[in-house]
C-alpha cells in the first residue's frame, strides 16, 4: 500500500500547520528543509560510486540519461538542460526523459507514469545503448514508468542508478547502484515536490556538476568551458580569464577575442603559445586545462 511509504506518511511536526501564523508556518517548513541536506550527506558514498561509474562511461563515449515522472521528471529535465549553457556540453551528452513527454513539463499527465512499457520505448527512441548510464528518479521508488526504463537499461548491460527517497524501494532493488536520501515525511503529507524534490535536486547537482569537474569542464572553481555567446557570458568569460591568467579585465578581453574560448585564452597567456599551439595542447589532454598547463 502507498500509505506504508515514507513519502506518504504524515509529519507530526506539521500536524497543526493550518492553524499557525504565517511566520510560524514558514519556520516549520524551514526546519523540515534543514533535514534534507543531512539525509543527502548520509548517501555521499553511494553518490560517489555512481559518479565514478558515470564518468567512466562518459569518457568512453557514453551518455547520461535521467528518467522520471512528475516532479522527479521535471527536476531531471532541469538538471540536464542546464549543462549545455553552463559547461558547453553537447545536448546529447546528458538527456532527460519525463513520462508524458515535454507536455508534462507544464501540465499534469499523471497516468503516464503508470506505463512501464513507455519507459522502455522512450529510451529506445533515444537510441539508449549499453555504454550509457540511466539514473531512474522516483521519490516513492515504485513508479512503473521509471522501473520499466531501469529494466530495459539493465537488459542491455548499461549502468543503472536508482534515486529515491524511500528506503528499500523497488527502484533501489532494481538498479545496480541505489541512492536513497530519506528526509522523512513531507510537511504536507505526500507532497514530494517539497523535501523529496529538494533532496533529488541536491543529488542531481552532485552527479552532473561532479561529472563536469572530473571531465575537465572546470578549473579551480571556474566554468572554463563557458562560451561567450551573450553579454552576461562574455563578461563572465573575461573575468575568468583575468582571474586564472593573472591579467587585467581589458587584457582578458583582448585575449578572449584572439583565442575564441576561455581555456585557449588562458593557455595562450600562461604558456606563451599561439592559438593553434594552445588548441593542440588542449586537445592532447582531452580538454583538461590543468593538465595542459602542466599542473
Image: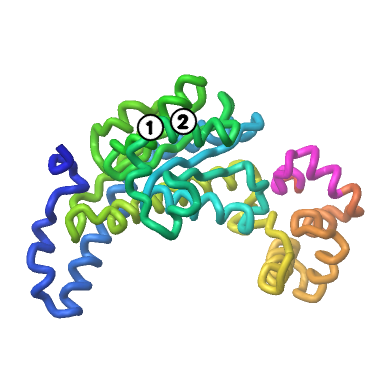
Relative image position of residue 134 (x, y in whole percent): 48, 34
Q: Which mark is residue 100?
A: none
Q: Secondary structure at mark 1?
A: helix
Magenta-drawn stretch contains 285: yes
Q: Which mark is residue 116?
A: 1
Q: In the drawing, does residue 71 fall left or right of residue 241?
A: left
State the residue in front, 247 or 129: 129
Name the residue located 45 percent from the left edge and 41 percent from the top edge.
67
Numbered-mark total: 2
Place residue 264 in its image quadrant.
bottom right
Name the residue located 32 percent from the left edge and 54 percent from the top edge.
37
Using a 10 Å C-alpha cutoff, classify the residue at mark 1 as few (fewer than 14 neighbours), some (14 to 19) or many (20 or more): many
State the residue in front, 143 or 86: 143
> Compared with residue 161, is residue 26 higher up or lower down, i.e. above or below?
below
Q: In the drawing, does residue 237 fall left or right of residue 147?
A: right
Relative image position of residue 114 (x, y in whole percent): 33, 38
Q: Is residue 42 visible?
A: no
Magenta-drawn stretch contains 47: no
Mark 2 vs mark 1, CA separation in Å: 7 Å
The magenta stretch spans which residues?
278-292
Q: Secondary structure at mark 2?
A: helix
State the residue in front, 243 or 235: 235
Task: Name the dominant secondary structure of the magenta segment.
Answer: helix
For the residues labelled 2 and 1, say whether their Cβ atoms are less than 8 Å apart.
yes
Q: Which mark is residue 120?
A: 2
Relative image position of residue 25 (x, y in whole percent): 17, 73
State the residue in front, 57 or 254: 57
Split into 4 quadrants, where in the image is the N terminus?
Answer: top left
Name the residue located 37 percent from the left edge and 51 percent from the top edge.
109
> Compared with residue 186, is residue 169 higher up or lower down, i.e. above or below?
above
Amino acid at each position: 500500500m502507498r500509505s506504508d511509504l515514507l513519502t506518504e506518511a504524515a509529519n507530526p511536526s506539521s500536524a497543526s500547520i493550518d492553524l499557525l501564523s504565517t511566520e510560524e508556518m514558514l519556520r516549520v517548513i524551514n526546519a523540515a528543509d534543514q533535514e534534507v541536506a543531512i539525509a543527502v550527506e548520509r548517501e555521499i558514498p553511494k553518490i560517489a560510486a555512481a559518479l565514478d561509474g558515470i564518468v567512466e562511461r562518459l569518457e568512453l563515449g557514453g551518455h547520461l540519461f535521467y528518467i522520471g515522472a512528475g516532479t522527479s521528471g521535471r527536476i531531471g529535465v532541469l538538471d540536464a538542460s542546464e549543462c549545455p549553457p553552463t559547461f558547453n556540453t553537447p545536448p546529447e551528452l546528458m538527456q532527460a526523459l519525463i513520462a508524458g513527454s515535454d507536455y508534462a513539463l507544464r501540465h499534469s499527465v499523471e497516468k503516464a507514469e503508470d506505463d512501464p512499457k513507455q519507459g522502455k520505448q522512450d529510451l529506445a527512441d533515444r537510441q539508449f545503448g549499453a555504454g550509457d548510464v540511466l539514473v531512474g528518479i522516483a521519490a516513492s521508488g515504485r513508479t512503473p514508468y521509471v522501473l520499466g526504463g531501469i529494466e530495459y537499461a539493465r537488459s542491455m548491460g548499461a549502468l543503472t542508478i536508482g534515486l529515491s527517497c524511500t528506503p528499500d524501494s523497488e527502484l533501489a532493488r532494481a538498479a545496480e547502484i541505489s541512492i536513497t536520501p530519506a528526509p522523512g515525511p513531507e510537511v504536507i503529507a505526500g507532497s514530494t515536490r517539497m523535501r523529496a524534490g529538494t533532496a533529488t535536486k541536491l543529488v542531481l547537482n552532485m552527479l552532473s556538476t561532479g561529472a563536469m569537474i572530473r571531465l575537465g569542464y572546470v578549473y579551480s572553481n571556474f566554468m572554463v568551458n563557458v562560451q561567450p555567446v551573450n553579454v552576461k557570458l562574455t563578461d563572465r568569460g573575461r573575468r575568468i580569464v583575468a582571474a586564472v591568467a593573472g591579467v587585467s579585465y581589458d587584457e582578458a578581453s583582448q585575449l578572449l577575442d584572439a583565442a575564441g574560448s576561455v581555456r585557449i585564452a588562458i593557455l595562450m597567456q600562461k604558456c606563451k603559445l599561439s592559438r593553434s599551439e594552445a588548441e593542440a595542447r588542449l586537445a592532447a589532454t582531452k580538454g583538461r586545462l590543468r593538465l595542459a598547463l602542466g599542473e
